[in-house]
Image: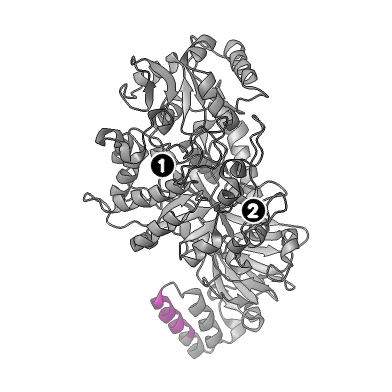
Amino acid sequence: MQSVLLNKVGQRTRHGNYYFKIILFGILFSISQTGFSQGQIPSELIHYPDFVFFNGQVLTADADRDFTIAEAVAVRDNRILAVGSNAQIQPMIGPSTRAVDLKGRSLTPGFIYNDGDNSVPAGDILKDSQWHGVTHPHLGGETLDQALATLSYIVEEENEPGEPLFFNLQDAWASTAKEAWGISTLDEVAPDNPVAIYLDSSYGMMNTAMLNLAIESGFPADHFHLDRDETGKPTGLAGAQLVGFVGREVRPWPVPQWFDDFAIPGAVETLAKYARHGVTLATGHMSALTMTVLNRVFHEQSEKLAVRVYPGLDFLRQNPNGEMYLKRMGNLVDFSLVDDRGPMVTIVGASVGPHAGSEDAAASLLSIHPKKNVIPGISPNAYGYNRWTAQWFTNLGQNELNELQKTQTDYYNVLLARQHGWNVTGVHNRGSEGIRLAMQNVLEAENQEKMYVKKLWRPQGFDHNVQWVPEVFEYYNQHPELREIIRFGVSLGSTIRQRDNEAIGVENVVEAQYGMEGLEQMAPLKTLLDNGIPFHIEGTEPEDDEDFPTWYIQKAVTRIDNQGRVISAEEGLDRESAFLALTRWASRFIGADDEMGSIQPGMLADLVVFNGNLLEEPIETITDLKPVMTLVGGKIAYESPDL
């Protein structure tokens, strides 16, 4: 009896307290000396596992290569108690243990999706349309004139006098709207209401009333993100810091009823969907509104907070007053909301704005090499635009800024964040020059003289890194110190599931602008792996019947696009690496690999049972495999009747 219990304790406390083992040994020795039989041991000293999974294929993800495949796992409280063979684990089953016969099916760590910006409503509030205290869909139409007519109708029929109005224009119209509209257009449509139109998350167009309101609210009138013509008159165009200021300082919070009727129900529904997909943690850049929603769900109905949410806070994102915020907040990295499942909401960094746009947007990919075809209706620039520098109208790259202008960009916020011990995360760098600049900025931040926190607690995390070219790999290899401080998320969407620009009738926008050669440079997973670059595959908010982890595994292996073509077959991963890129490697992105991403004693019990065998199912049909049970911290977050 002593040896069995000590074996359990040794496995349970591998990451824990050595002295606890000694104390328990003393208790057991005392029991043996008093003559208690096994049946007489007080129940307070016996804590059997809550779950035992046996007779399965346990993909432990306990190593980057040749990870262990076990048969059984025991879970107690919110942690993994033991991993091993059926013969080792099944004897641990107690009277109240739920024993699950896996029948050869796969048991995996929980999957981690890092493009979870919209896992809670208002995750990206900066771009949301809003009036009357509630958010609305984006502003669109079949033509740009229809979009303007819709705007006019809302201003005339639905506004309150003097009320600020915020509109998210469909990305497809951004470039043409910039050329067709100006401050006079918006002044004519809304002479009395401050109006801001988001062309994307970093560029906007505003009428005179909104610009005046921004300046009255504290935005510097001489800031270079407020565009002016040669006479000094505002054009209405706004760069990232002005867009961010208006979107967060000028925009009022939605009315309280919005939280009850929309935000909280929407959050509960989305997080439950993650659990059904086997996703146990969503991370991404998230707003203050998101934090309030998560906090309310946690305290008011914690059982409905189905999965963990680890935000990168948006407080520095496109913020012209970053230093003021940091002086007031200090460092909040790792602050958590914790229940009996473990940390459910944890701050994992600060978010700053994106360097580059998406391939179908006006800012476009910020790239080292030019596009093969420039399509003005999508983006008129061969290299894309740097969003941090408002290059779309300033014509300035980062290295062309003067010292004052540098302090008026998110480059400066990266430096400030590092000074105060905040890692930055959730930064979009789709283009190759954006990726290279991310590395350069991290190195410059790390080499500052003034540091209040000497060593970061979590790594610098940059996502949406899709366009890798030789110059980027060379820069990384020239700076080996980057290996310890930076992590990359890679999206398969640009390669496997290209988007169309329906507004101007362009299909497959990556291929249309960059050609097949450019398409083949997107998401070179095998080359990243061979170069030892710490990356993971990004997952985004799932649809009901799409975006299961098995979809990402299949596409990472086969690289078959949505037209049935194989794109850069040599960049495909083996199945095991694709699986790791969504679990073990994804946990490293947020510096949580000591708690999750693998199945090992002492790790959080975030587990997924599939309805089949992930390693033996033909890759062509692996998407038929779906989760039938998801555990988060040892508690059931989702269970299918099929189990």
Q: Is residue 304 magenta?
A: no
Camera-nearest residue between 100 and 221: 221
Q: Quadrant of the C terminus?
A: bottom right
Q: Is residue 25 magenta?
A: yes
Amino acid identity at mark 1 = Val
The residue singled out by tag 1 in the image is 352
The residue lying furthest to the right in this view is 642
Q: Secondary structure at mark 2?
A: helix
Name which residue lies at 48% across and 46% down.
431
Name which residue lies at 55% across and 46% down.
116
Say the numbered circle drawn on residue 275: 2
Q: CA distance from mark 2 to mark 1?
A: 28 Å
Query: Taking 411 as reference, is 574 left or right?
Result: right
Camera-nearest residue between 274 and 484: 484
Amino acid identity at mark 2 = Ala
Q: Provide residue 188's location: percent of width, then percent of height.
A: 52, 9
